[in-house]
Image (cartoon, rainbow, N blue to C red):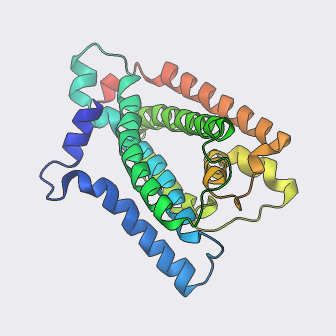
């Protein structure tokens, strides 16, 4: 399903898979010119690299959920005519964009090696590998479970589509990608419990950029995040159990 999605996405396109590199790069250029050069909001050491890495992570999340959103509708013939687990289309949407993400990550590593004056101490340490792995897994859980919820709701309630598009449009400005968001300490627990992308994103950034905040080390923030993630997984399971049997009738 994932390879089929990739072929369908770039079918009859002159640039083909090159769009998977070009689109986030053009987003990065637009944000950098506006916020760093015109508004002078983005500043600090290695801001361009930090912004580019953040854009790649957000693109992974946004593209995965957008593809997962329509996974049942676009796979109508598969879901209605073949006996297959209905978990597969939303998960395949995640896998499709994850392959794109790792290709873009290679591009980031090349630019990182070229742009950094020196490697941070302990960049390739076991601790950093562990933080990257756990952050990647937590973001993957968020994407997959959101895909399951959105895919089921989208079949039954088409109003969900414009709502999710608004969430993605404004979500990038509520996530520490373009600029650092100074969350007061008394609101940090609530913020990271609601924005489940912010904490793993900051954790991944902290591996490559020593000046990056290490909010994920705060115990109360980490506990709140884990609880919220568990609630999302439970909601995904309940949504699937309640709605998955009805989607064939609506499709």
Q: Position of residue 187 (x, y in %)?
A: 82, 55
Q: Position of residue 214 (x, y in %)?
A: 75, 52
The quadrant of the rendering that contains the C terminus is top left
Number of dots carrying numbers: 0
Using the image as rendered, state which of residue 45 and residue 200 is in the foreground.
Answer: 45
Q: Position of residue 122 (x, y in %)?
A: 67, 47
Occupied quadrant, residue 228 = top right
Using the image as rendered, state which of residue 67 and residue 200 is in the foreground.
Answer: 200
Using the image as rendered, state which of residue 8 and residue 82 is in the foreground.
Answer: 8
The residue depicted at 39 percent of the width and 55 percent of the height is 107
Q: Is residue 167 above or below residue 117?
A: above
Residue 65 lies left or right of residue 250; in this view the side is right
Residue furthest right as drawn: 186
- Residue 124 in view in this figure: yes
Occupied quadrant, residue 124 = top right
- Residue 163 in view in this figure: no
Residue furthest bottom as drawn: 38
Residue 6 lies left or right of residue 217; in this view the side is left
Q: Is residue 122 above or below residue 209?
A: above
The residue depicted at 36 percent of the width and 17 percent of the height is 85
Residue furthest top as drawn: 83
The quadrant of the rendering that contains the N terminus is top left
Q: Position of residue 167 (x, y in %)?
A: 53, 55
The residue depicted at 36 percent of the width and 31 percent of the height is 92
Q: Is residue 128 above or below residue 185?
A: above
């Amino acid at each position: 399903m994932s390879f089929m999605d990739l072929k369908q996405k770039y079918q009859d396109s002159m640039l083909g898979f090159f769009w998977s590199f070009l689109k986030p790069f053009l987003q990065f250029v637009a944000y950098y010119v506006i916020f760093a050069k015109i508004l002078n909001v983005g500043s600090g050491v290695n801001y361009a690299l930090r912004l580019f890495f953040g854009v790649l992570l957000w693109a992974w999340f946004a593209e995965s959920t957008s593809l997962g959103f329509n996974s049942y509708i676009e796979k109508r013939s598969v879901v209605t005519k073949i006996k297959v687990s209905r978990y597969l289309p939303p998960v395949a949407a995640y896998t499709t964009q994850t392959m794109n993400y790792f290709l873009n990550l290679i591009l980031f590593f090349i630019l990182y090696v070229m742009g950094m004056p020196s490697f941070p101490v302990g960049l390739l340490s076991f601790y950093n590998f562990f933080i990257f792995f756990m952050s990647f897994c937590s973001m993957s859980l968020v994407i997959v479970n959101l895909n399951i919820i959105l895919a089921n709701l989208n079949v039954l309630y088409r109003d969900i589509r414009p709502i999710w598009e608004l969430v993605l449009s404004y979500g990038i400005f509520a996530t520490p990608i373009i600029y650092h968001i100074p969350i007061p300490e008394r609101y940090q627990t609530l913020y990271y419990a609601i924005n489940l992308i912010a904490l793993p994103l900051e954790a991944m950034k902290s591996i490559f950029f020593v000046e990056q905040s290490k909010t994920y080390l705060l115990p109360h923030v980490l506990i709140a995040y884990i609880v919220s993630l568990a609630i999302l997984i439970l909601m995904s399971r309940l949504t699937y159990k309640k709605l998955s049997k009805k989607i064939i009738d609506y499709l």
